[in-house]
Amino acid sequence: MADPMKYSSILQVPGVCGGRPIIAGTRMSVKAIVGWTRLGLTPEEIIDEYPQLSAAQVADALAYYTDHPEEIEAEFAEEKRYLKIEFPRLQAMIAAQRQQQD
């Protein structure tokens, strides 16, 4: 659980974004911030893309990840498992729709 004294911008609320850590006042997840940094975006570039975020919020998200990597890595792993199942299903559905149109 996010410590509000340590990460003033990070919340975990049951029923909001699956109870995953998010930036307060948004539905922006810590995982999303970490994912963008993995793609090479700097905190400044993230803020440029999402001007509703402050430097302090992005810093809190990255600090949360630093202190809780296993929690956020589990989210990435869950997403990867989901996509492994869903992507082929969606491809098949799109292919079937295209065949019906032809």
Image (spheres, rainbow, N blue to C red):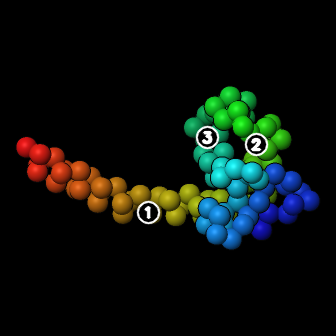
Q: Nearer the viewer, residue 49 or 31?
A: 49
Is residue 51 positioned above or below 13 on the image? above
Picture disc at residue 18 = none
Question: How far across and how far down the image is residue 15, in percent?
Answer: 64, 69
Q: Is residue 66 left or right of residue 80?
A: right
Q: Earlier in the sequence, mark 3 or mark 1?
A: 3
Please identify the quadrant where the C terminus is shown.
top left
Q: Is residue 17 left or right of residue 65?
A: left
Is residue 31 positioned above or below 75 on the image? above
Q: Amino acid at mark 2?
A: Val
Q: Earlier in the sequence, mark 1 or mark 2?
A: 2
Answer whether residue 42 is visible to the viewer in this image. no
Q: Nearer the viewer, residue 50 or 38?
A: 50
Picture disc at residue 82 = 1
Q: CA distance from mark 3 to mark 2?
A: 11 Å
Q: Quadrant of residue 39?
A: top right
Question: How far across and how far down the image is residue 58, in percent?
Answer: 76, 42
Answer whether residue 4 is visible to the viewer in this image. yes
Residue designated by label 2: 58
Q: Residue at x 61, y 40 (%)?
A: 36
Q: Amino acid at mark 1?
A: Tyr
Q: Nearer the viewer, residue 34 or 7?
A: 7
Question: How far across and how far down the image is residue 43, in percent?
Answer: 72, 35
Q: Please name which of the two marks, 3 or 2, marks the residue nearer to the observer.
A: 2
Picture disc at residue 36 = 3
